[in-house]
Image (spheres, grey):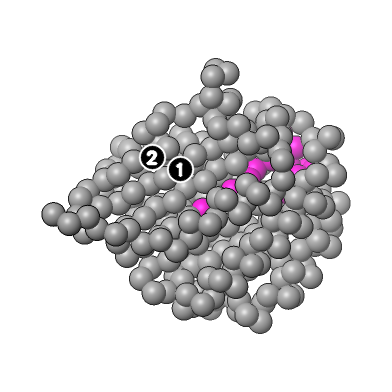
Amino acid sequence: MPEVKLKDAVGWTLPDAQSRLGDLGWQPEDRPDDFRYATFGAGSKQLRVTADGWQVAAGKLCARYARIQTALADVATLMAYPTASPDLLPVFACEWVILGDRAHVLVLDVECVGESQALRDRARAALAPLQARYIARLPTAADLPQWFLEIREAWALFTSGDLARLGVMREAFQHYLDATAATLYAPWLARARAGDDHPAIRDYKRHHAVHSPGYALLAPRAGESWTRRFLDDWHFGPARPPAGQR
């Protein structure tokens, strides 16, 4: 049987994030290889999952990445969460869902999940000008899903359209990464704490786990058990120690 070529549209997501969020010591977390790389099905039904997590900035941030590829779909999501200090550091979040020749969902946000108005004010100053720069080329999709309305910030971008829009979103993604690294992470990391996930972060992860498109994409081919473990224990699970430090 000839090898099926998997769709490749968003492979730049992780390299862009790791280069632009700065030299923050991305240490791969302790996780089973089965939840770093897995392939299910064969031929035209093949599905590949590439994923990982990292302790970042000596445990003050936790980053998670997942990419799901089939012959017709390429889906990537990247999140950088504060662990114990959501009052000082925001969540960086993006998700790209590419189906065929269409950008089905492109969402980019930097979310303040603690109760600090000062953090939200800093984020607005850094990111609202970027949102204003891109909103004409990345117009907000009609009928935004309720899960997004519950968590979105005013500077978020949520769009859909043809694949030309994906190139514009990558440019916006790079600029949001630069602004977050320079003005919202680097000046505040010295004051932030490492530790177990703050309750606000646990609630945020739980909200995303419930509403993630990953379950619908993965479960039919990867199975219920693997999918639940991947999403609940790893992709949206608690911050983990680096490999070799358990």
Look at 58% across and 57% down and name the residue there. Answer: 94
The type of residue carrying mark 1 is: Ala
Mark 2 residue type = Tyr
Magenta-drawn stretch contains 224: no
Against 177, is 83 above or below?
above
Quadrant where the image shows the C terminus = top right
Q: Callout 1: helix, strand or loop?
A: strand
Q: Residue at x 32, y 58 (%)?
A: 6
Q: Which residues are magenta?
A: 77-90
> Is residue 88 inside the magenta stretch?
yes
Question: Where, by quadrant of the figure, is residue 171 drawn?
Answer: bottom right
What is the number of the mark on residue 51?
1
Which quarter of the rendering shows the N terminus?
A: bottom left
Task: Quadrant for residue 56, please give it.
Answer: top right
Image-based side of 33 in relation to 207, left or right: left
Q: Which mark is residue 37?
A: 2
